[in-house]
Amino acid sequence: MTTKMTFTDPRLAALNGFRVELTPDKQRADIILDRPPLNVIEMAQRDQLRLVFEALDEDDRVRVIVLRGIGEHFSSGGNIKGFMEASPEHVSKLAWNIAAPARCSKPVIAANRGYCFGVGFEISLACDFRIVSETCFYALPEQKLGQIPGSGGSARLQKIVGITRTKDIVMRSKRIPGKQALDWGIATECVPDNKLEAATDALVDELLTFSPLAQRTAKKLLNDTEDSTLAIAIELEGHCYSRLRQSTDFKEGVEAFHGKRAAKFIGS
């Protein structure tokens, strides 16, 4: 059964343009952008999204987080007027707020369809997996406003597709369709629009079969070594491997393998 989540933090008493649902039997939480038809993301919403990711990271009922939108479009981006009204101090925090999915220790899946522009694209890039429908279009259109992406979009994109393709997307405000996003390594999977929910559900189910401790370790290791030298990355990988060698989950995994049965991981 899926239930609407409430939070003890008074700053989350009334969520701005989105809601959070918990499915306990799936150990799943859905953050649902709910300001149709375009799910525009307000300035205050960015702060709340960060706080929600932090709260879900601490919630033992949640193993996997899904970020999705209501309707035909994930999000057309931010409220343009909000940029002019926000203080410089507030604007300087935009990238930190939108990076919340990357900092979260748990797997985060973005389910994208239709428009996924501006901050909608940037927060999706901060997720671990991007499942896109064939209707999806990714774009960073800030050049049309005389601006550049301000929430980590160009930086994350360059790490994924390289400088040439990033310039093509950013400097021309170019729209990238779902299939092309898959070919370029931006999307994890591209499916027909009517299969987006099923593909997302299947990935959630798959992730739940693995050790939560091993998944947290893998995510942090990969994030932390993205900019490191190969030697440092291998060294850190070795330390993480050694630490997991002592875990109950690894012992269970080895015993399950030899016993030809499904492992029952507990996250320790």
Image (cartoon, rainbow, N blue to C red):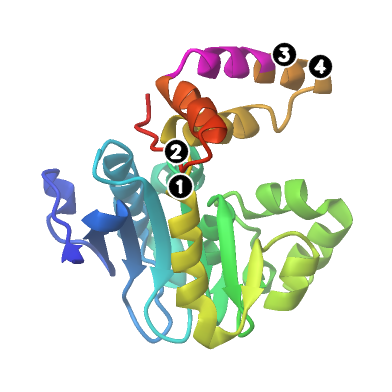
Give the labeled residue for mark 2. Answer: 263
- Looking at the picture, how far across and down is residue 268, in whole percent? 37, 23
Q: CA distance from mark 1 to mark 3?
A: 28 Å
What residue range appears in magenta? 238-247
Residue 83 falls within the magenta-colored stretch: no
Q: CA distance from mark 2 to mark 4?
A: 33 Å
> At 39% across and 46% down in the image, what residue appears?
90
- Looking at the picture, how far across and down is residue 12, in whole percent? 18, 52
Give the labeled residue for mark 1. Answer: 209
Which residue occupies the foreground of this view, 67 or 156? Answer: 67
61 relative to 29, above or below:
above
Q: On the image, which quarter does residue 38 sit in?
A: bottom left
Label 2: which secondary element: loop
Label 1: which secondary element: loop
Give the labeled residue for mark 3. Answer: 235
Viewer-side label of 4, 1:
1
Q: Given the image, on which type of amino acid does mark 3 rest? A: Glu
Mark 3 vs 4: CB contact within 8 A:
yes
Dot 1 alpha-carbon crowd within 10 angstroms: few under 14, some 14 to 19, many 20 or more: few
Residue 81: numbered disc: none
> At 42% across and 49% down in the image, what residue appears?
208
Q: CA distance from mark 2 to mark 1?
A: 8 Å
Q: Given the image, on which type of amino acid does mark 1 rest? A: Thr
202 relative to 54, above or below:
below
Quadrant occupied by the N terminus: bottom left
Viewer-side label of 2, 3:
2
Mark 2 vs 1: CB contact within 8 A:
yes
Give the labeled residue for mark 4. Answer: 231
Q: Given the image, on which type of amino acid does mark 2 rest? A: Ala
